Amino acid sequence: MTLPKFFARRRKQRRRSADQLTVFSSQVGIGTLLQGELNGKGSYHIQGEVVGDSDIEGAVVLAAGAYWKGNVTADYVQIAGKVEGNVAARSKIELTATAVVTGDLSAPVVAMAEGALYEGAISRPRNTQVTRYSERRDPDTTKLPA
Amino acid sequence: MSQRRSLDHLRKVPTILGREVVYIGVIEGRDNYVVHGRVEGNCDLDGVLLIGPDCLWVGNITADTVIVKGRVEGGIHAHFKIEVRPSARIKGDLSGPLVAVAEGAVLQGRVSPDSIITRFTERRTH
């Protein structure tokens, strides 16, 4: 591999916000149901079910198969599961190809993969930048740390 | 390798609530849990629940096995065993077939009369 190519590849692998997440301070496993208000700091990896509202200082990653009913507010939100409610992020929202969202999205940057479904509006706090992309990464490399 | 403590058998923990989590509500599920943050509410779990040393739990706890290292204000009911470690502070009643209390733990409340109580001194460092 030539050197410029190597750097180009490196740059690409750091573009998604999830590339910068290595360790999650909180995880919600499959088969767990949280019913209530989730607040606090840190990064959250959710594979189970949450019913309620959240206000989180940090990242929220909803894995494929996860279900969230309620409003999500966080710094960064990545959705691969199902959400019924409004999603607000202070920096970025990413919908991957498996995402299903019923509700409004509001963030300065919204990135949507081809195949993501959403019903609702994208509100624009200050000219929301909507990026549409098709998933070219190998599913194995997009896998998050367990 | 020792096998007597409940944590020695713990293989996988799919749900972890971190230090800076504040959760108000109900938790239900069927696997193992570790909580380090603050929880207000009740839980009903099929699995092991570990309450970390910095945790404050206000509410009633029901699980198969409960290991307490932090603070709990509320009753604890275990289907199998309750382990109270030296750093634990519990304000509430305990009920379960087996209750193990370490020297140094603070317990304000009653232990149900039909449980077998073991007292132990913590000699492990972890």
Image (tube, coloured by chain):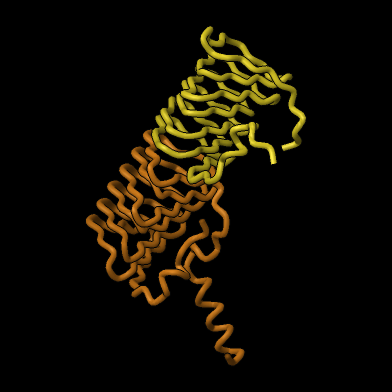
Picture colour for chain B: yellow
Which one is nearer the viewer's eye here, A84 or B121? B121
Residue at 63% across, 32% down: B5
Q: Is residue B86 above or below residue A113?
A: above
Residue at 51% across, 23% down: B58
Residue B110 figure quarter:
top right
x and y percent of residue A128 in the render? Answer: 36, 63
Quick check: can you spot residue A127?
no
In-image side of A125 versus B21 (left or right):
left
Which one is nearer the viewer's eye here, B91 or A124? B91
In-image side of B24 versus A119 (left or right):
right
x and y percent of residue A70 in the render? Answer: 32, 42
Residue at 51% across, 38% down: B33
Residue at 39% across, 33% down: B28
Query: Which chain: orange?
Result: A
Kindly give the residue lying farthest to the left in the view shown.
Answer: A119
Which one is nearer the viewer's eye here, A34 or A58? A34
x and y percent of residue B106 in the render? Answer: 67, 16
Q: In which quarter of the image is the N terminus of chain A?
A: bottom right
Q: Is residue A138 above or below residue B91?
A: below
x and y percent of residue B114 in the render? Answer: 51, 10
